[in-house]
Amino acid sequence: MISRDIQDAVQSLAQHQELEIFRRVFFASPDYIAFSRLSDGTYIDVNPGFERLLGHRREDVIGRTSFDIRLWPDEDGAQRAAYVEMLKRDGAVNGYEARICTKDGEILDMETSANVVEIAGVQILIAIAKDITARKRTERELIRLNSELVDKVQRLEAAEQRALDAAQQATNERRRMDALLEAVPVGIVVADVDGELVRVNAAHRRLWGEGAPLTRDASQYADWRGWWADGSPRHGERLGAEDWAMARALRGEEAPRDILEIEPFGSPGERRTIVISGAPVRDGGGRIVGGVVAQMDITDRVRAEAALRQADRRKDEFLAMLAHELRNPLAPISAAAELMELAPLDQARLRQTSRVISRQVQHMNSLVDDLLDVSRLTRGLVVLRKDAQDLKTVVANAVEQVRPMIAEHRHHLAVDLPACATVVAGDHKRLVQIVSNLLNNAAKYTPAGGNIRVVVTASDTSVMLCVEDDGIGMPADLQERVFDLFVQAERASDRSQGGLGLGLALVRNLAELHGGSVSCRSAGPGKGSSFLLTLPRMAGPEAPTTEAKRGAHRAAPAAGRRVLIVDDNEDAASMLGLYLEEFGHEILIEHCPLRALEKAREVRPQACLLDIGLPGMDGNELARMLRAEHPAAMLIALTGYGQESDRKAALAAGFDHHLVKPVDTARLTALLSAVA
C-alpha cells in the first residue's frame, strides 16, 4: 500500500508540474489558442488570447462550434472546409491565412497553425492563431498610397507641361513640385523619354547615397545594384538594366509594386529593402514623354517581421524542448512505479527506487525554477539582497554544486584563485547561480575527459572570473546570440544533459543586475570556449556575510505535533501525512475546507498545512478563518503558486510560511519542530 501511495503521489506531482508549465504558456500567450474536437468541431477550451481577440467569453464558447459563434464570415463554411481538408491531408496546418468574425462582427485577418493530436482515443484539434489584421491593412494601404502617389506625380508632370506656355507660371509650379518632392518621405525619381534622370528628391538621395549618379540614358541603369526580394523563383537574382521600374515605365509597362534589395552607392555590403513602383508619363496625345518612380524603404519592417518569425520559431523549438525535458524524468519515475507494483521490494531496492524518483523530481523542479527565474527576470521582479561577498567563496560553493557532473564526465577541473581580496557587492545565492551555470555549460559541451579551468583575477575596480574549456567551441554567429533565451549549441541527439537554453540567459541578466557583464569567445568549432564574468569590486576590507559560509542541514526529528493537512489531492495529502508520521507527528487529513474547519474546532491542531487551490474556498480564505479561531496555530501554505505576489497574498491572509511544491521536506520538518 505504501508503494502504491508513493507511486500515485509522484505521478500526481509530475502531472501537476507539467500542467502548471503548460498553463503558464496557455494563459500568457497573446495569440489565440483553442482546443476542439475534430469530429464535430465543438470547443473544449480556449485561452485568454481567444477571448481578447474575438470578444467571446470562454464559458460561452466551450461546448459550441465555430458555426455556433459565427466565427466564419462565409456562411456556407467554405473557409473551414478548406481548413479541415488541409488538416486531413497533411495532418497539420502552418501559416494558413483566413478571415474570421469577432463577436461584434468585426472581420479579422488571422494566420493560423494547427495540429491534430489523439488524446484518450479522441482526435483533438489544437489551433494557434495570430492577428495579422494590422499587417494586411498596412499592405493594402501601401498599395493604395503608391497608386495615389504615382497619380499625383503624373498630374504634377502634366501641370509642368502646361506651364511651359507661361514662363512665370512654370517657375512657380516647378518650385511647388520641388518642395513637395523634398518633403515626402518616399524616394521620387523622374526621367525623360531617353531615361535620363532629370529629378530626384532628398528621400531618394538618402536611400541610394549622396554619390548616386544621375544616369544619362536607360542603358546605364545596369550600374544600379539591386536584387529581386519578392519570394518568387527569381528571388536573389540581380536586376538587369531593362528590369528596373523606370525602364519598364519608359516602355509603357506598369510596375506597380516590386520588392527589391539594393546596395547604396558608396556603401559596399550594405543592403536595404525597398518597395518600388513606376509608371510612364504621357503627353496630351498619349505619347510617352518620361517616367516616374516612387521608392519606399521597408528595411526596418522586413527586419522586424524576420525577428518575429525567428521568435516564433524559437517559441516552437522551446515548447518541443520543454516537452522532451519533462518526458525524460517521467520515464524513470514511471518505470520505478511499475517496478513497485510488480512485487514487494526489499529495503535495498526500495531505497534505490526512492532515490531514482527523488532525483528525477528534483530535476523537474529545477526546470520549473529556471522557467520561473526567467519569468521574474524578464518582468523585473527579481530583487537582490546585496552584501559583501568574497568571489572565492562563491566559486567554492558553485564548484561543490557541479562536482557530481564533472566527476561523471571525468573532466579535469582547475581553479586558479588570487591571493588578494575579491570582494563584490552581491546576492550570494544569485552569484553562486551565475558561476554554477557557467560551469554547467562548460561541462555539458566538453567531451568526457576534457579540461575546465576557472580563473579569478582582480583589478582596482573589477573582479573577473573566466571559465575556460577545451570542448566543442562555437561558430561566430552563435557567439553573437549565445546569451539569448532558448539558444543552445548542437549536441548529441540523446540530449543526455538536458536543459532548455535558459542558463546563459539567466547568467547575463543576473550579471547585469549586479552591475556587471558577461561575454564569450571561441576560436571556432572544436576549439573550446571561454566565458568572462566582470563584476564591480568593492573598496575596503568588508568581510563576506555569514550566509555565504552557512551550510544546509536536515532538521532532526522533533517531538510529535498535532498537524492538520488540508489538500483536495488525496494522494498528495496521504503521502505527506505518511512522511510526517515518521517524525512522530499526529496527522489529521481533510480534503474539504468546511470539514477542515470543523475538524480544527474538534482537535485544535498545533500546525495546519494548507493547499491554496481548494474547492469551494481557497486556501487563503481558509487561513483567515483558521487564524481567527486558532491564533496560536502555525499556518503553512503548501502550493504550486510560487510567484512573489502569491507569497505576499499568503502572508497577508495569515500564513506564517509559504512553501512551494514540491516541498522542501527538511525545511518543513524544521518548521514543525519549532512549533510550541
Image (tube, grey):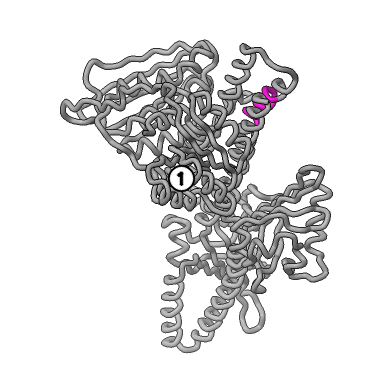
Give the image location of residue 498, x and y in percent. 58, 27
Tell me if residue 595 comes above or below residue 537 in the rendering: below
Q: Where 304 falls versus 345 (above or below)? A: below
Q: Quadrant of the C terminus?
A: top left
Query: Residue drawn 63% across and 47% down?
Result: 236
The residue positioned farthest toward the front in the image shown? 602
Q: Nearer the viewer, residue 48 or 599?
A: 599
**Residue drawn 43% across and 30% down?**
667
Q: Determine the residue located farthest toward the left in the rendered image.
A: 540
Question: In front: 287, or 317?
Answer: 317
Secondary structure mostly seen in magenta is helix
* Quarter containing the N terminus: top right
| 346, 407: nearer the viewer | 346
Considering only vertical position in the picture, is 67 above or below 93? below
Examine the rendering and report whether any part of residue 373 can be seen.
no
x%, y% of residue 673?
40, 29
Q: Which residues are magenta?
A: 327-337
What residue does disc 1 label?
643
Tell whether position 32 is magenta: no
Residue 182 percent location from the top left of the image:
42, 70
> Which amino acid lies under the numbered mark 1 shown in the image of this protein?
Gln
Question: Residue 663 location, x and y as percent?
Answer: 50, 33
Above-or-below relation of 418 to 537: above
Q: Dot 1: what SS?
A: loop
Q: Would you identify the image quadrant in which residue 19 lies?
A: top right
| Residue 28 seen anywhere in this rendered image of the structure | yes
For label 1, the crowd category at 10 Å Cα-Cα, with few meaning under 14, some 14 to 19 and many 20 or more, is some
- Residue at 42% in and 21% down: 556
Give the left or right position of residue 424, taking residue 343 as reference: left
